[in-house]
Image (cartoon, rainbow, N blue to C red):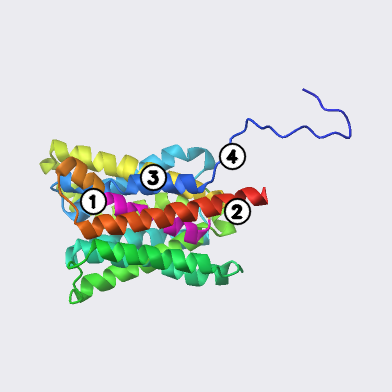
Amino acid sequence: METKPGHQSAPNKAAPHFSPLLLVLGAALLWSTGGLFVKWTSLSAFELTFYRSLLAAATVALLTRREGFGINRLTILASVLYAALLLLFVIANKKTTAANAIFLQYTSPIYMLIFEPIFYKEKFRRADLITVLVCIGGMSLFFVGQLKPDDIEGNIAALVSGLCMGFYFLLLRHPRAQEVNRASSVIYGNLLLVAICAPVGLAVIPALGVNDVVAVSYLGIIQIGVAYTLFTLGMARGVRSLDAGIVGYIEPVLNPVWVFIFLKERPSQWAVLGGAIIVSAVVSHMILRARKTRLKI
């Protein structure tokens, strides 16, 4: 249909407008299923990492192949941070409690809260600070009586993993990260992990059982591959690093829910209360961000 000179065509009202935060939310929902499938496999953390990362790299490469496989200095750094955050989280789980590991890793939004306004010349938002504090407070209720301050090595690994996560999220927002395949850091970061874990992973091939194959296939293809494709797409569409970090709190909230539904491991009443607080804070934050985005359109 042609338009007359001097007249603009009317905007397509049928075109759907949705917040890219929903892509990040979809990623967080998939990430949250990881604990369930990790429990289904007898593989060690490094054996699991090898197969999961191998399948994840292949999946993301397949899903984003049209964007090519270029890389620049910024995505090299992002790839290293991505590999480090995953590997350090594995080490943390071996050296300290699972509660310590996930709680300390999810201090990452604090770093985003501090550095995002500095890196991207943005105004500091008091609402962001309140949301992060509420989420951390709610998350602390998950682990009443479970956090152990004496597991020093594991706690340090988890804290550094959270630091790497924070700066990884910040780098994904950088304009230079969009010069190449938006998911290149995920592809190359997983390949780096494959190289690190190859001696252990290849040695266990003869002992792989059906449960192991099913678990690593899901974890690599869906829980990491599809999830990080959604996540990097959301970041490429303008999601702030801190917003992504806040929505990411859905992952530790739902992780015990899936385990309870399928493996009947009942979470504590404190965990249920903490989860309700976090979900309320995240949903409120998403609604406010979506409203502000519509006002700018």
- Image point (85%, 33%), residue name: 7
- Image point (59%, 57%), residue name: 175
Q: Amino acid at mark 3?
A: Ala
Magenta stretch: includes residue 177: no
Cα separation between marks 1 and 2: 32 Å
Q: Amino acid at mark 2?
A: Lys
Cα separation between marks 1 and 3: 19 Å
- Image point (28%, 62%), residue name: 102
Cα separation between marks 1 and 4: 32 Å
Q: Amino acid at mark 4?
A: His
Residue 256 numbered tag: 1
**Label 4 belongs to which residue?**
17
Region in magenta: 240-256
Please tell me which of labels 1 and 4 falls first in the chain. 4
For the view shown, which residue lies furthest in the right direction? 5
Tell me if I can see residue 249 in this picture.
no
Please tell me which of labels 1 and 2 falls first in the chain. 1
Could you tell me if the residues under marks 1 and 2 are in contact, i.e. CB atoms within 8 Å? no
Mark whose residue sits in front, 1 or 3 = 1
Residue 227 numbered tag: 3
Mark whose residue sits in front, 3 or 2 = 2
Cα separation between marks 3 and 2: 26 Å
Residue 201 or 109: which is nearer the viewer?
A: 109
For the view shown, which residue lies furthest in the left direction? 207
**Label 2 belongs to which residue?**
292
Please tell me which of labels 2 and 4 falls first in the chain. 4
Mark whose residue sits in front, 3 or 4 = 4
Cα separation between marks 3 and 4: 21 Å
Relative placement, left or right, of 244 versus 194 is right
What element does badge 4 sit on? loop
Residue 291 or 46: which is nearer the viewer?
A: 291
What element does badge 1 sit on? helix
